[in-house]
Amino acid sequence: MSDAGEVEGVDAAVVAEKVAAAQAAVAASDDVDAWLSVGRETDVTPEPCFPYLLGFDVVWPTAVVVGPDSAAVVLGRHDAPTARDLGVHEVHPYDESIAEPLREVLDGMGAERVALNYDRDDVVADGLSHGLFLQLRDYLPDREFVSASALVRRLRGIKSDTEYERVRAAAEETEELLAAATAEWTPETTEREFAAFLHDRMTERGLDSAWAWDYCPTVHMGDREVGHTLPADHTVDEGELLHVDFGIRRDGYASDIQRLWVRGDVSDGLREAFRDVRAAIDAGHDVLGPGAVGHEVDAAAREELTSRGWPAFEHAFGHQVGRAAHDGGTLLGPEWERYGEAPRHAVRPGEVYTMELGVATEWGYVGQEEMVRVTETGTEWVVPPQTALRSL
Amino acid sequence: MSDAGEVEGVDAAVVAEKVAAAQAAVAASDDVDAWLSVGRETDVTPEPCFPYLLGFDVVWPTAVVVGPDSAAVVLGRHDAPTARDLGVHEVHPYDESIAEPLREVLDGMGAERVALNYDRDDVVADGLSHGLFLQLRDYLPDREFVSASALVRRLRGIKSDTEYERVRAAAEETEELLAAATAEWTPETTEREFAAFLHDRMTERGLDSAWAWDYCPTVHMGDREVGHTLPADHTVDEGELLHVDFGIRRDGYASDIQRLWVRGDVSDGLREAFRDVRAAIDAGHDVLGPGAVGHEVDAAAREELTSRGWPAFEHAFGHQVGRAAHDGGTLLGPEWERYGEAPRHAVRPGEVYTMELGVATEWGYVGQEEMVRVTETGTEWVVPPQTALRSL
C-alpha cells in the first residue's frame, strides 16, 4: 500500500447533519470563531470527531474547519475526490504541506480564536495529539487556541435524528439477540457457549461488538467474581442468575444494556436484591432530565442503593452511548479525580445515556443497565426496561 | 458496560521482549532517565506504543514507565490483575488518581528527564494527546519532558525475533492467498469477485486486513485509474494486467505486497515497463542497508525510474511494516514537507521495509511492492520477490 491515501465507506447522511449542527454551534458560541479538527493516519490513531465531521479515513494530515456559516476540509490531493463526492465541505487539496491552505481557509473565515480538540478528561474531545498541537502552534502563530470541549460535548452528545435511529436499532437488535440466545439455553449451557452463540449470530449479521469482542458479551452464570472475567465453563444452578452485559455496533452506533434471568424458583433474598437494584436505578432516573448535573444523578442512585444496606458501586452510574459504548461528554458519575470535569456538566435534550449498577449476591450478580434518551421535558426509554426477573 | 475496565488478549511473548529492549534503549540513552507512555480508553484512542509495551487495552488513565533497569505500570485497580498475570512490569494500582503513584514511580527511578510520546511527523510516536500532556505538565511540574521519538523509532522499528517471525508468516500467508485466488481466476472474474474471494478466505481464517478492509486488497484489472479505487466490475482483457496490492494482519503483525499477472501474450511495451519498474526497485534496494538515509534510498529508485522516461511516483518509495502496514519511523521517501523528519533518519538492522512503485500503461498499472528485512550487512527478502510477469 502506498501512502497516497485511501478511504472507507462514507456516512454522508450523518456527516451532513452533524456539520450543519457544528456550524450552528460555532455561530452560537461567543467564545470561538472556528472549530479546527486535525488528524492523520486515522486508521492508526483515530480522531474521534472525524467520523461525524468528515466521514472517512485519511492518511495525510487533514483539517476540518467549521465556521459559523461554512465548513471546509484541507486534505491531501488523493483524498479530495472523496470529499468532493461527499459534497458537505469546501474542498482544499494540497500536495506537499497543509500549512498554507489551512491559513487561507481560516483567514477566509476571519477566524482569530480557534477551538482545537483537546480536553484533560474527555477522551472523545481529546483527539489532537501533542505533536500535531506543536505543529499547529508553528503553522498558525497568530491565532488564539482554546479547547473545543464544549463544542464536542454538544455535537457528539446531542444525537441527530439519523443517529438516534441507529442507536435505537442497535439496542433493539441487542434485545433480539439476547432473546435468541436465552431461547437456546439449556441447563448444560456454559458461559463460553452462551457467548459463542451471540458471537456467531453477530458474525452472520456483520455486527461489531460495542466494546472489546472477547468481553462483549460478558456472561456471568451463578455466584462468581464480576468484572474482568472472560466467559468460562460455569453453568447456571437451580435458583441462580444468568447476568449478561452486552452491546453491538451497527452502522457506526452502539448499544449497551444488561439483562438478568433466573433458573427455577426465585428466593426471597434474590427478589429483594433485584427490587433494591431497580429502586436505585429508578432513583437516578427520577433525577435525570434536561439540566440535571451529572454527579447529582449519580448521587441519587448511589444513596438509594446504600440506604438499602448495599455497598456502593465502584463506577459511574451512567454514561453516554453513541458512536461508542462509552461515548464521553457529560458523565452521570461521582466527583472522583479520575472523572475530572465530566460529572459537573448539565444533561441536555437529545443525549442518550445508559444507567447501570448492581450488587453481588449468593445467587449471582444482580446487575441492571437501561438506556434512555433525554427529551425536552424528561427522558424516554430507548428499549423497554427490565422490570422483573425473567425465567430461563 | 461499566467504566470499571476491561482487557483484551495479552501478547505476553512480545511484551516481555519489547520491554526488555526498551530498558536497554533507556539505559543506552544519554538524553533521558525514563520513558513514560500514557493512554486511556485505548479502544477509542489507541496509544500506538501500548500494544508492545503493555499488551492490553485499558479504560482509566494508565502509565507505562520504563527506566534503565526496571519497568512499571500505574493503572486502575481493575486492570491490575491482568498486569500481574502478565508479570512483566512492577504493578502500581490506583483508585481515584494516577498522579501520586506516578510521581512515586518516577522518584523511585530518580527520573528527572522524562521522554513522552509526541512527534510532529511520526504518528506511531505521537500517541500522547494534548489534553493528557497538559495533565502530565500539572502532575509532574518539576520534570523535564522530551520527545520519545528516538526510543520509539528504535523499539518499534527493530523487530524482536517473535515479531519478525510474525511479519514473515503474514507475508507468506499473503502469497498463499494470492496463489489461491489466481488459481480460481477465469476470464469472467471481476475485480469485485477477486476481492470477495480473498475476503472470504480471510474471514474463514480469522485474518484482518492490513489496512481498511474495503481497500485491502486493491484489485486493478486492465487499464484504469489507480489509487482510490474500490474493486469494480472490470475484467482482464487479453494482453492486460491483473494488479493486486494486498496485506493481512495476523497475531498483530502485518504484510504489504503488490503482485502482477498478465492474461495471454505479453507485448513488448509491457515487458519494457515491467523491466523498468523492476530496475527502479532494484536501484533503491541496492542503496538500502544499515546506515542508509531514507531519502537517499528513495532518490535512487526515483532517478532510475525517471531516467527511463517514466513520471516520478507521488508517494514514498518505501515504508516500514510491522504492527501496521504503515509502521512509521524512518521513511524511504523524498524530503517533502508532509514527511517532515521521517526521511532524514538512518536505516537500522532489524527493521522491515516494503519498497513500492509503479507506472501507468495501456495494459494496466505496472506496480511492484517487495518486503525486505535489514540485516547487519545488507538486506534479506521477507518472501521471494516477483522477478517476472506471471501468467493468468
Image (cartoon, coloured by chain):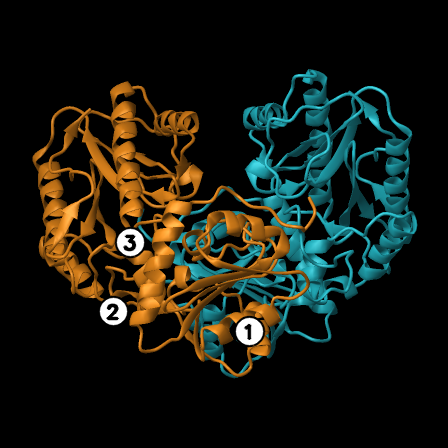
Chain colours: A orange, B cyan
In the rendered image, the vertical position of residue B94 relative to residue A167, given as above or below = below
User: x, y (%) of residue A94?
Assistant: 63, 61
Q: Chain of mark 3?
A: A
- Residue nearest the observer in this picture, A25 or A328: A25
Specify the quadrant of the image occupied by residue B138: bottom left
Residue drawn at 45 percent across, 47 percent down: B7
- Residue nearest the observer in this picture, B385 or B278: B278
Mark 3 is on which residue type? Gln
- For marks 3 and 2, the one nearer the N-term is 3
Disc 1 is placed on an element classified as: helix
User: x, y (%) of residue A33?
Assistant: 40, 75
Residue that carries the numbered disc 3 in the rendered image: A320
What's the CA distance linking mark 3 and mark 2? 14 Å
User: x, y (%) of residue B112?
Assistant: 59, 79
* Visible residue check, residue A256: no
Which disc number belongs to residue B55? none
What's the CA distance linking mark 1 and mark 2? 35 Å
Residue that carries the numbered disc 1 in the rendered image: A103
Mark 2 is on which residue type? Arg
